Image (cartoon, grey):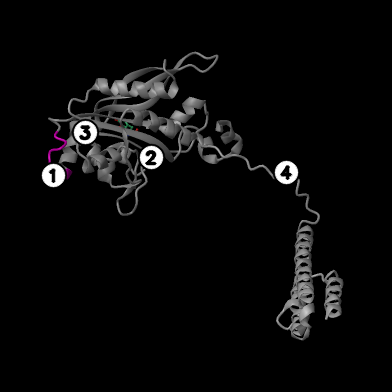
Amino acid sequence: MLEELNAIHQDALKEINGLTDESRLEEFRIRYLGKKGRLTAASAGMKDVPKEEKPAIGQKLNEVRTAITEAIDTRTGQMIAERDARATDGLDVTLPGRPLPAGALHPLTQILSQATGILRRMGFALATGPEIETEWHCFDALNTPADHPARNESDTFYFDNGMLLRTHTSSVQVRTMESQTPPVRIIAPGSAFRRDEIDATHLSAFNQLEGLYVAEHVTLGDLKGTLQTFFRGMFGADTEIRFRPHFFPFTEPSFEIDIKLQATGKEPKWLEMAGCGMVDPAVFEAVSKARGDNAFDPDKVTGFAFGVGLDRLAMVKWGIADIRHLIENDQRFLKQFAG
Ligand code: DAH
């Protein structure tokens, strides 16, 4: 029996080195160590071994089993290593990876978060409204009569059903007052749409930021302080701003706001940045009528509103000469605002 075991041992070790794939190796394992394998068959002969030889033969049996098992493990490891080596054959795994360029925020996104950041720190909450609006929310409730030029077919995108693409974010003032009660202090950034001829300063879709504060005893002083803080936050602490009388249907009195900016090497210039004013009582009346209560009673509450062009803010802040750069996604342009 001892000879038989030695023969099995030698045959196995000889054979295993010639095996080149994993399925042949498995077949080999079954042939030697399986239930009907050679070693298993040989161990059946233990019952005929004289008692005094049993320990020695038993030990030999275990040695051979262990040796074959270890040989199989070693050969499996070699096969996996060979397979991995073949898979990366010709590949230089030490070659550095291709760098992915880091993304960056679009300049308009940067302006938006800077602007909303300043105003939210002053206590304004974010509000939204739909871009497809009713004429009532966009115009009538904002004291803008049917014959106002802004309502003209040539200025505004109308749908067949009478809805329109909002021409300004001021419609969110109305939406907010319909659903909230004073004190109301909101900002509403968003897109607005006009049938404008597209050129260096006009797009048919652009971005505004609307502000509204309604409570008891809101004054023009509050409006001035708020907007001065806002523009100084945007353009620097010593930025001069001026209020120029103007007309908007939904505010009375109304103003345009200019800021004084000096480009390096140039004379300082006043640049128009926003519209604003004290909410016209007619707006409160329209809202009160729609609500059916007197939460916005014009004898009780006052308010201010303002509207800033976000594209314009970006253009002035960075000296961008053409608004179309903001929508063309030319990386050579956008990269200048990264990091
Ligand atoms: N809605 C105006 C526009 O699109 C901007 C504006 C002016 C908004 C005065 C206001 C405001 O809230 O009080 O040109």
Of marks 4 and 2, the one in the foreground: 4
Q: Main secondary structure of the magenta part?
A: loop
Whether 294 is among the magenta residues is: yes
Element at label 4? loop
Do labels 4 and 2 touch, CB within 8 Å? no
- Identity of the residue drawn at 81% across and 70% down: 20
Q: Earlier in the sequence, mark 4 or mark 3?
A: 4
Task: Calculate the distance from the C-alpha at mark 4 to the C-alpha at mark 1.
Answer: 69 Å
Provide the residue designation for mark 1. Answer: 292
Q: Earlier in the sequence, mark 1 or mark 2?
A: 2
Asked if the residue at label 1 sits under 8 Å from ligand 1, the reply is: no
- Given residues 133 and 294, the one toward you in this image is 294
- Identity of the residue drawn at 24% across and 37% down: 142
Task: Calculate the distance from the C-alpha at mark 4 to the C-alpha at mark 3.
Answer: 59 Å
Amino acid at the residue labelled 4: Pro
Amino acid at the residue labelled 1: Gly
Asked if the residue at label 2 sits under 8 Å from ligand 1, the reply is: no
Task: Calculate the distance from the C-alpha at mark 4 to the C-alpha at mark 2.
Answer: 44 Å
Q: Earlier in the sequence, mark 3 or mark 2?
A: 3
Query: What percent of the width, then of the height, locates residue 1?
Result: 83, 81
Provide the residue designation for mark 2. Answer: 190
- Given residues 324 and 207, the one toward you in this image is 207
Element at label 1? loop
Of marks 4 and 3, the one in the foreground: 4
Task: Calculate the distance from the C-alpha at mark 1 to the C-alpha at mark 3.
Answer: 18 Å
Do labels 4 and 1 touch, CB within 8 Å? no
Provide the residue designation for mark 4. Answer: 96
- Label 1: how many residues lie within 10 Å, few (<14), some (14-19) or many (20+)? few
* Magenta residue span: 290-297
Residue 216 shows up from this direction: yes
Element at label 3? loop
Provide the residue designation for mark 3. Answer: 183
